[in-house]
Image (spheres, rainbow, N blue to C red):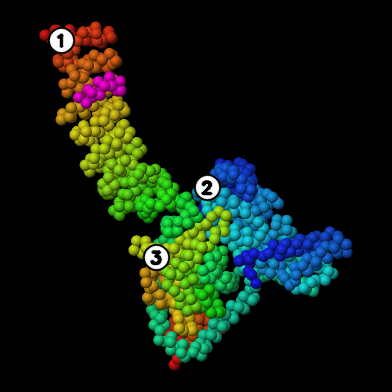
Amino acid sequence: MPSHEPSSREPTGEITGEHRTEPVNVARIIGSTLDGLIRSCRVESPSVMQIAGRLLDRWRPFPDCVLRLEPTALYIGDVEVLTAQEDDGRWLLPAFMAGVKTVQLGDDTRPEDLVRLASELAALGPSLASIARLRDWLWAEGAEGFDVLLDHGFVDGLDASMTDPVRQRALLEALRSEGSVALGLMAERIASRDLDAAAARDEFFLPLEAFSQMLSEGDLSLSSDETAGLSADCDDSLFWIDAQVHLAFAHPELQAQVPAERLARRALALVRSGASGRFLNFLAELVRRREPYARKLQQELDTAEAGEALGMHVPLEERYIETLAPLLAGPASTLTRTLANRLLERCTGSRESLQWLARLMATVGFEAFLGKVDAAALSERCAVVTCRLLIASRAPLHPLAELLAHVAPATGIKLAGLLPADMLFRLKQPVLKLVSTASHKDAEALLATLGLHAQHDWGEVLGEVLQSSRGADWPLPVVRAACAVIAARGHAASYLVPLIQDRHVGDDVKLTALRFIEKDPAAVAKLGSLSLASLFQSREVKDRVKELRRRQEEGR
Amino acid sequence: MTHPGNIPVDTPEEVLRVQGLVETLFVAMRTIQAYGTEHPLSRQSTLALGQRILEMPPPFSLQFVGQALFRDRTMIPLPLRVYRLGHHLGQVLHRLHLQELVIDRTIPAGNLVEFCRALSEADAGRLDALDGLEVPGLSWRELPSARYGIEVEEVDPEVFSSAQLALAIGDAELLPTGAAPWSFAKGLTVVRRLERAVQVSREAVGRALELVPGPWSVARRAVAACTHVLTALTSLEASGATRRVAGHAALAISWYGLSSRGGGPFQRAAGYAVERLLEAPAVARTGVEPHRAKTSALLFLAAEERLEGDRPPPLLDLLRLAYEVEVRRCPGDVRFDLTLADLLATVLNEPIEGCNLAWSRVLATAYGEIPPGARVLLPDGRIGLVLGDSEAGRLRPQVLVNGAVVVPEGPVKFISPAALARAGGG
């Protein structure tokens, strides 16, 4: 429409797609529900928002569906969906007189948009003031959320229709003649003192030769890039949002009239089309400000969609590190969480971007940055690269612990494999958690690796865990692997024998522990000193202990 | 006379009188169609029609154009029932190739019967029903470029643009002055007219702007500043919303900032304008429209001159350029004015401080290859006014010389006011 940009979509005016089988019914429902909504707005019914929601549910599946206004009827495609009568559809004629030709849903129409449009249509009456008000409202982009086509030919085009071409042509001719005559007589008309005054003034020594030369050589034309750049600058939605925000900051009394929700909505629409560094600047400016209006805007912009888009599109340039840092160092929010994840995913693909990310993390603080990350949602590749980055950056242990604790178990096993022995030992809690959550095979492999770390006594660590958990937290193969580490580090007597003594430990765990005791004479001796009757309930365990004792006697 | 695009508010009584007239005319036509001219009911209905005409009272005219009804070229809002009758009458008149009825004085009843009979015959399909008929006090005519029931398409760009421009200047003269709050409706009316004129033909509107008779009043220069912005942005294919906002802002700044000769500083003009805009009461039921918020915000930025990085936002450059051009249009202390070509030559040679020169280049070419209205010297020594581009070449535009439009044999040369002044003084 003249007041609203034509949609990029080419409206067909027809209901298409999967609902083709019942287009007429759906179209009529849309028409009558719209009229119902307008009538409800007229009587200020409290249910207008629900009606708008229902209408939107009906209408949204048909984004190409165009409402076409005629003076006495409303059409969708060729179907007359509403006929103007004294009550029903009485808004149609004045709306048509105001120049409304077609109405189509926008990309992001919401129930409140429908209510806004319906309220203005409800207020329409057959008076010039009312019609003019609607026309001005539409021209002033009032119908947000819709693509409305205003007909030049009806109200405004009448100027041209009513212009008497004969009279107008005569006026033009007279104008031309007058201009020409005036030009011819100019020397006589201008007083001498004016000429003197003019001749003395600098501004009349015009560089017309240079201008003429520029014109003849075509120096004035802009390149297509320059033209496109200027045009894009002028239409930059963020510029307009930013300008309105600044106006609202300077004039708080306007804040209610320029609602943060509406501006945020436009900003989010912009983000959807590919957020730029300027959007980030805008956001960072909001973060810096303390006014409730700024806070409200921030809340409205706090969406995963915005974080996702920012993370995807923010230029990985040095200057944006400073802009991003306060945002990511602040309290966690939906936006910052999504942003942090998206940045990790995006930046772990190349060396340059990884370096940029490392600088960003260092500026934000590793803990603060990874505190925003939803590790469970990270891909394995990204987690691995992040882990490497943290190791290389000598980051504090906490972020690594968080990473290990929250990534998928299989990924965690891989990360554990990357950690130096010393670091791994200091991260024993998340490592032990991994042992519990990983697959048997992965856990066995990890425990085997831990057993090889000579400088750290994983046997003692595992022994403590096994003892306190009585082996119930781990599956048997994992218990077996843990027992192997415990026995290999010479802790069988300290941890495995008490396990066998414990009446609450399952037989299968005890039998597993027994297998690793037999290679440790001290443990076997300790076991031999215990009274069978008081300690063992199971025949199988008793038999196995007896067997051990017998072999010990034979050995002597 | 009011004009239809700027819908004026008539009193309800006047509107009701027109509606009643239309209703009675329709009834009279149909009654005669059903009962003939001699039936008492037919007489009665035409008498009622005569009474309605008397109540109007004459002289007045009715136009049936574009499915709408106008009285004295002012649109009349119609309730649905009367609209249907008026629509039918409009179709009947259209069949007879006429759109306008002019009633100068009271019409004798007998003549009214004849007229209604002709209408009823036309309604039945007779296309020559009015041939030879003369009704004292009543005349009718076709509005040549008007159509009934279809969009107006056949409008001469020159006529359209100059009409819209003249109307816009007239509207601008009604803009609020002094400390009164701004009128968004009036401002938008001016912008809308200019936007349409520019859309139809940038060259024609440039020509009309420079050559329309009358002094370079503040209203005309404010309209010119608005036109510069709209033309530049249209040539860049900027969105309609941006064009309108920037045009509106340029209009407001210029309206408050320009004086009869010269004008005040840009920033101060913008500051004054934004105050007036912010004082304007909201009229929409549903709050402030985006256009209004954006126009105020743009003026606020212009007043604050907030920099974005190391440069002002690009649109502010354009606003400043359009304003400064119109400030310089009428320099103080002298009684003649500069043409757009003079002004563009100046700003291209000495860019306005802090202004992106690209905008001057955009404006220099936006109205055509050579700015219309420029005074030029033809190769044969005659002096003329540039009307617009020709196909002959860049420096061979259409030139108006002594009332005739010519395309010069060779390149023209611009003439500066200083040269003219010196020539005259000599």
Screen quadrant of the N terminus of chain A = bottom right
Which residue is the extreme one toward the bottom? B426
Identify which residue is drawn at 38% across, 76% down: B349
Q: State which chain disc 2 sits on.
A: A
User: Residue B227 location, x and y as percent?
Assistant: 50, 70
**For the image shown, how many numbered marks are present on the structure?**
3
- Residue corresponding to mark 2: A110
**What is the CA distance from the residue labelled 2 to the residue labelled 3?**
36 Å
Q: State which chain disc 3 sits on.
A: B
- Residue corresponding to mark 3: B305
**What is the CA distance from the residue labelled 3 to the residue labelled 1?**
96 Å
Screen quadrant of the C terminus of chain A = top left
Vertical placement of residue B100 versus B398, above or below: above
Q: State which chain disc 1 sits on.
A: A
- In magenta, the rendered stretch is A459-475
User: Residue A118 location, x and y as percent?
Assistant: 59, 51
Considering depth in this image, is B48 or A298 the residue closer to the camera?
A298
Residue B219 located left or right of residue A551? right
Location of residue B134 (image quadrant): bottom right
